[in-house]
């Protein structure tokens, strides 16, 4: 058995109560390591330490917080290649994408380093003469962060960076499928001159560590990214404890392809957004709503593009799509292929497991045509390299189909008409709308989030992140008479 990689609690690396094996989804014979599982006592210790460290960090001031965040961001960017390779090895995205993710994580830290300096308040006049009012933002306190495996460094980065920038302490539970990336990010943060216990890594399963963290009365705020069912459970616990909550969850992102679209570009964007990252993105294009006049030509192009992707080992030169993250996820994906066929959808390509030189969880990019929006494959998030095409007779019909979903994260339209693009931007019920762009791919300095079951609570990222990571205090001061 490999030596256990520990967790980071109260300023110290510690061994866990138990451990899990972490294996490479591109090659299951590659054991990345054994990773600690936090005990209940270790989680409680992390929460106590965070509570003590938080006021020290707030008192340290904005220059200190700026400097620490800049140092973290700069190191992540400088080491993007090395960290990106680890992301690729344990999550399965191609190394170039892993590198891009690590670099972007660095950008979140440098962006929020500057936001730390901009934490300004407001002055207001009082209706009572002689009274002064100011409104200022203070930290919420101890923030619990629960993150998924699909962006194992970028997602926690866009939560940890604002939490620290605005003076909070953090207890982070990463996904158990990607502990190695979590340890690498923690090493960079823990190396900084920060109060012991300000930042804690509590690796472990959602059912044990996650659940205990969520139910803790000593947590002031929870930021979660993951599935809707787990999100619902977290929301219930937060209602009981009155904990501030922000969540990003599932999606079923539509992309409308109009009859006046640049078809070649539409195929490229749809294929990239549907299959990039093995389809394991909350911004993936999973419902393609195509005008009947260009339907057949678009579908031919999409199937050719789907077949053209090079699926292989994430660390191999030339790989464009890596494996599915785990055997369990692959099984779920193949189940959805069966569900789609049973519902009467036409599988035009893919749908099967692929054999490669190493034993991994490979799946061919898959296109379903002749689908209806009421089919399960168009209603439930698959998180798979599978996309579904629907035909529409008009823009109005396409928009109605696009809006008919419990989710509302991202949505796109491909059209040359400015009037339609403007109408879509105004009438599409989604947190992010894309015109002549893929549904996936967002910037790091502007808000990100959705509507309906996709999101809950204040937005993440950009200056809007202050809404969640701070609490507002209104101070009334009687000016008094000078003595
Ligand atoms: P989960 O929602 O199960 O997991 C997300 C995070 O929550 C993980 O850290 C997980 O821990 C943790 N968790 C699980 N159960 C609890 C709990 N009871 N209390 C607190 N934390 C908990 O998503 P999965 O990773 O299992 O993925 C399942 C599906 O969710 C995917 O197929 C996809 O549809 C969707 N998903 C969507 C994402 C998005 O960005 N929209 C991201 C990831 C998943 P653990 O380490 O044990 O998994």
Image (cartoon, rainbow, N blue to C red):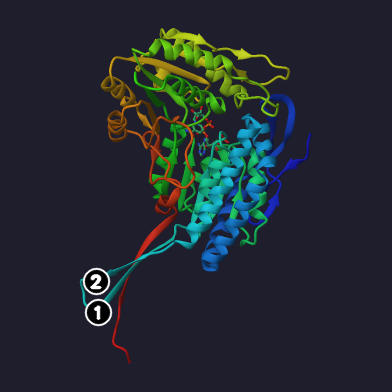
Place residue 135 in its image quadrant: bottom left
The residue under label 2 is 126
* x 42%, y 54%: residue: 466
> Can you tell me whether the CB of the residue at mark 1 lies under 8 Å from the nearest atom of ligand 1?
no
Is 379 left, or right, of 199 in this rendering?
left
The image position of residue 258, as x and y in percent, is 35, 21
* Viewer-side residue, 223 vs 235: 223
Residue matched to label 1: 130
- Tell me the residue at 66%/48% (across/down): 78
Taking depth in this image into account, of 358 and 254 the one nearest to the observer is 254
Q: In which quarter of the image is the N terminus?
A: top right
Residue 166 visible in the current orientation = no
Location of residue 313 with respect to 75 vertically, above or below: above
Viewed as shown, does residue 143 lie left or right of 136? Answer: right
Q: Which of 451 and 302 is in front in this view?
A: 302
Question: Where is residue 38 shown, x and y percent of the image?
Answer: 63, 44
Q: In this view, does 52 lie above or below 321?
A: below
- Assign a secondary structure to mark 2: loop
Residue 307, x across and y down, in percent: 56, 14
Relative to 12, does residue 301 appear above or below in the rendering? above
């Amino acid at each position: 058995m490999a030596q256990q990689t520990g967790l980071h609690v109260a300023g110290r690396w510690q061994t866990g109560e138990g451990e899990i094996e972490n294996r490479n989804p591109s090659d299951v014979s590659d054991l990345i390591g054994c990773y600690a599982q936090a005990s209940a006592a270790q989680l409680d210790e992390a929460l106590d330490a965070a509570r003590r460290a938080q006021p020290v960090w707030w008192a340290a001031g904005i220059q200190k917080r700026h400097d620490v965040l800049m140092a973290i961001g700069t190191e992540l960017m400088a080491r993007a290649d090395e960290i990106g390779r680890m992301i690729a090895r344990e999550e399965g995205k191609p190394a170039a994408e892993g590198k891009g993710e690590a670099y972007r994580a660095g950008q979140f830290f440098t962006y929020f380093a500057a936001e730390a300096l901009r934490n300004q308040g407001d002055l207001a006049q009082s209706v009572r003469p002689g009274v002064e009012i100011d409104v200022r933002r203070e930290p919420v306190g101890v923030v619990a962060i629960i993150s998924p495996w699909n962006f194992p460094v970028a997602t926690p980065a866009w939560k940890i960076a604002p939490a620290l920038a605005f003076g909070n302490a953090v207890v982070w539970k990463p996904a158990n499928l990607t502990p190695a990336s979590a340890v690498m990010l923690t090493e960079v943060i823990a190396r900084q001159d920060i109060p012991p216990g300000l930042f804690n890594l509590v690796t472990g399963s959602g059912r044990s560590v996650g659940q205990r963290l969520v139910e803790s009365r000593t947590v002031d705020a929870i930021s979660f990214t993951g599935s809707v069912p787990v999100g619902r459970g977290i929301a219930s616990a937060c209602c009981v404890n009155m904990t501030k909550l922000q969540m990003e969850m599932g999606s079923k992102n539509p992309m409308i392809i109009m009859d006046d679209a640049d078809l070649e570009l539409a195929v490229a964007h749809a294929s990239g957004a549907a299959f990039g990252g093995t389809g394991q993105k909350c911004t993936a294009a999973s419902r393609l709503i195509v005008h009947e006049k260009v339907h057949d030509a678009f579908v031919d192009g999409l199937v050719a593009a789907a077949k053209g992707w090079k699926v292989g080992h994430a660390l191999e030169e030339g790989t464009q799509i890596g494996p599915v993250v785990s055997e369990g996820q692959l099984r779920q994906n193949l189940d959805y292929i069966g569900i789609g066929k049973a519902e009467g959808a036409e599988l035009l390509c893919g749908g099967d497991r692929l054999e490669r030189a190493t034993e991994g969880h490979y799946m061919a990019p898959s296109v379903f045509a002749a689908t209806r929006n009421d089919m399960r494959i168009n209603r439930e998030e698959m998180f798979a390299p599978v996309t579904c095409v629907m035909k529409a007779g008009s823009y109005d019909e396409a928009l109605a189909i696009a809006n008919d979903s419990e989710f509302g994260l991202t949505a796109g339209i491909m059209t040359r008409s400015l009037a339609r693009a403007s109408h879509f931007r105004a009438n599409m019920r989604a947190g992010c709308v894309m015109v002549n762009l893929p549904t996936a791919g967002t910037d790091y300095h502007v808000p990100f989030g959705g509507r309906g079951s996709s999101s809950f609570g204040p937005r993440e990222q950009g200056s809007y992140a202050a809404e969640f990571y701070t609490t507002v205090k209104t101070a009334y001061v009687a000016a008094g008479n000078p003595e």
